[in-house]
Image (spheres, grey):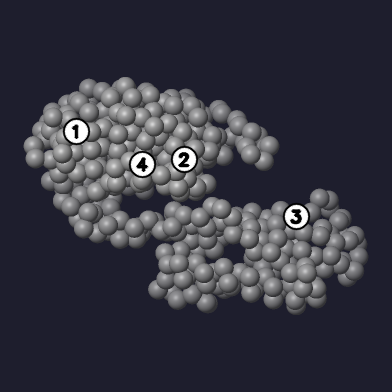
Amino acid sequence: MKKDSFVLILFLVLIASAYSQKSVSVKNLKDFIAKNMESYESLYLDLHQNPELSFHENRTSEIMASNLKHLGFEITRNFGGNGVVGILHNGKGPVIMLRTDMDALPIIEKTGLPYASKVVFQNDAGKSVGVMHACGHDAHMSVWTGTATVLTKFKHNWKGTLIMIAQPAEEMSGGANAMIEDGLFRKFPVPDYALALHVDPELESGVVGYFPGSSFAGVSSVDIHIYGIGGHGAYPHRTIDPIVLAARTVLDIQTIVSREISPLNPAVITVGSIHGGTKHNIIPDEVIMQLTLRFYKEEIYDQMIEALKRITRGIAASAGLPEEKYPKVMVTDQYTSPVYNDPDLTRKVVGYMKETLGDEQIIKIDPLMAG
């Protein structure tokens, strides 16, 4: 954590200040970051032990806002939900936006670490769930705060406007759109450059990976309600079993990616959840499936949705179900477009990184199907 945070804070500071007219002393930056590293780690540990779910980032949001206010930023709280916008005007120059996410995942932490999360939260469905920063947002916020601190300390070395964005609800999607719909780019300066990062457990500590162009996949969540005609498990011939139809569906939709979509277009359809039935000897009337879809092109996404509807209807028809009992394929609100890194900006950023961190610390990575 320490080496990664040090490198990432230095990286963001150097990139954000690279468009200034004054040079930045890398040695002075490194010395300041090292001197204050303990406070960044303390923030990381606090955030890790006190995670909050999407749309519930109340304490986390307040910490992010308070830290920025202490540094002299103009603060807007509760923007697009629990979002935070911090503005620092520092003379005439480019507008740079630095963004972090804040929310955690509904996962019970089993790392055994002395600072492991023990938080249990009642989610929107009324179910008690464990909560954990399993996706690195605690590290993102710590690096983001450290970067704001260093840029404020060395603001005589750069000119322009710095916008710090703490975004809610990344894990469930919706947080970014909520901030935009609330007027993010109407009420505040429009950034010339927007920078963000994500930790990667597959990279060696201290190494920064990059990719120009599409680097993270688009994500959509789909619910499929499969209907049947229930009955007693001892008389299956008198029913149309939705559990069997669900099993057929799981197998048949595997052919969408393998046989309907060009191998040159990356796509993923994963069934992550199946729920149906209440007792050993009862055939239910309904099974609910939950899927995640990954894609890089909108037309591929549309093709997957159409295929899901066609295949599930076909299975229902072949089982003899009437049309009113055909499955419902419903796209949820959880939708995220693919991440596209501007190639020109990426090349500039890579150049700055190599100059200051060394060629061996900067590597080009492959695009991911994560979103």
Q: Read off the residue under disc 3.
A: 276
Q: Nearer the viewer, mark 2 or mark 3?
A: 2
Q: Residues within 10 Å of mark 2 (few under 14, many from 20)?
A: many
N-terminal label among 2 and 3: 2
Q: Read off the residue under disc 4.
A: 187
Say if mark 2 contacts mark 3, CB within 8 Å: no
Give x and y (percent) for residue 259: 53, 77
**350 to the left or right of 21:** right
N-terminal label among 1 and 4: 1
Q: CA distance from mark 1 to mark 4?
A: 18 Å
Q: Residue 80 shows which numbered tag?
A: 2
Tell me the amino acid under the disc marked 4: Lys
Helix, strand or loop for disc 2? loop
Q: Residues within 10 Å of mark 1 (few under 14, many from 20)?
A: some
Picture residue at 56% right of the left edge, 53% below the top: 333
Tell me the amino acid under the disc marked 1: Asn
Q: Read off the residue under disc 1.
A: 90
